[in-house]
Image (spheres, helix red, strand yellow):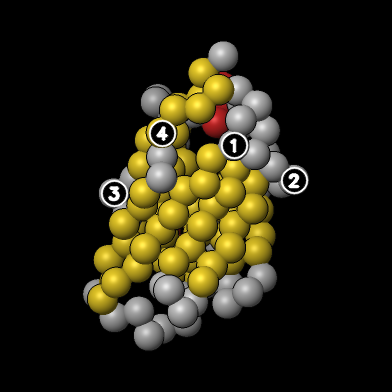
Amino acid sequence: QVQLVESGGGSVQAGGSLRITCAASGRTNGNYVMAWFRQAPGKEREFIAGITWASPFYADSVKGRFTISRDNSKKTVYLQMNSLTLEDTAVYYCAGGRDVSRQTRAYTFWGQGTQVTVSS
C-alpha cells in the first residue's frame, strides 16, 4: 500500500501563487504515475495535472499557470499554482496509479485532500 498526504493548501488572493505538496510513504518502490485532481463544491472531481517519471501533462484549464513536478528521492510531488483565480477554489487531491490517464478510475491511491481558497 501507498499512503499519500497533501499539505500546503490555504487561502490566497486572486492573482497570487501557492504550492501544494504530496508526500508518499509505504510501498513506493513502484514507478507510479502521480497526478493532482481537484473538486469544487457541487462539482465532479477533475484532473489537473499528472507526471510520469519525468514528463508532465496538464488539463487545458491550468496549462501555463500550474506546474507539476516530482522529487523521486524525496517521494514528493509538487503543484505550483500561479495566477490563481476564484475558479481554482477547490479541494486538491493527490493520486497515484500505473497508467498515464486523466480519469479518476485509473488511480489507485489517493490522499485526503487539501483546501485551496482563492478570494477577490
Element under disc 2: loop
The residue where tag 2 is placed is 64
Judge whether 112 appears above or below 28 on screen.
above
Tell me which amino acid carries mark 4. Gly
Element under disc 3: loop
The residue where tag 4 is placed is 10
Q: Earlier in the sequence, mark 1 or mark 3?
A: 1
Residue 31: image location, x then y, percent: 47, 82
Judge whether 93 appears above or below 27 on screen.
above
Task: Work out how far the residue at label 1 is from the one at label 2, CA to CA, in angstroms.
Answer: 13 Å
Q: Is residue 52 left or right of residue 76?
A: right
The residue where tag 3 is placed is 112
Element under disc 4: strand
Look at the image and tell me in which quarter the N terminus lies: bottom left
Residue 22: image location, x then y, percent: 40, 58
Q: Residue at x 65, y 64 (%)?
A: 56
Tell me which amino acid carries mark 3. Gln
Q: Earlier in the sequence, mark 2 or mark 4?
A: 4
Tell me which amino acid carries mark 2. Gly
The residue where tag 1 is placed is 17
Task: Work out how far the residue at label 2 is from the one at label 3, CA to CA, in angstroms.
Answer: 26 Å
Residue at the far bottom: name it: 29
Q: Earlier in the sequence, mark 2 or mark 3?
A: 2
Task: Work out how far the residue at label 2 is from the one at label 4, CA to CA, in angstroms.
Answer: 21 Å
Q: Earlier in the sequence, mark 4 or mark 1?
A: 4
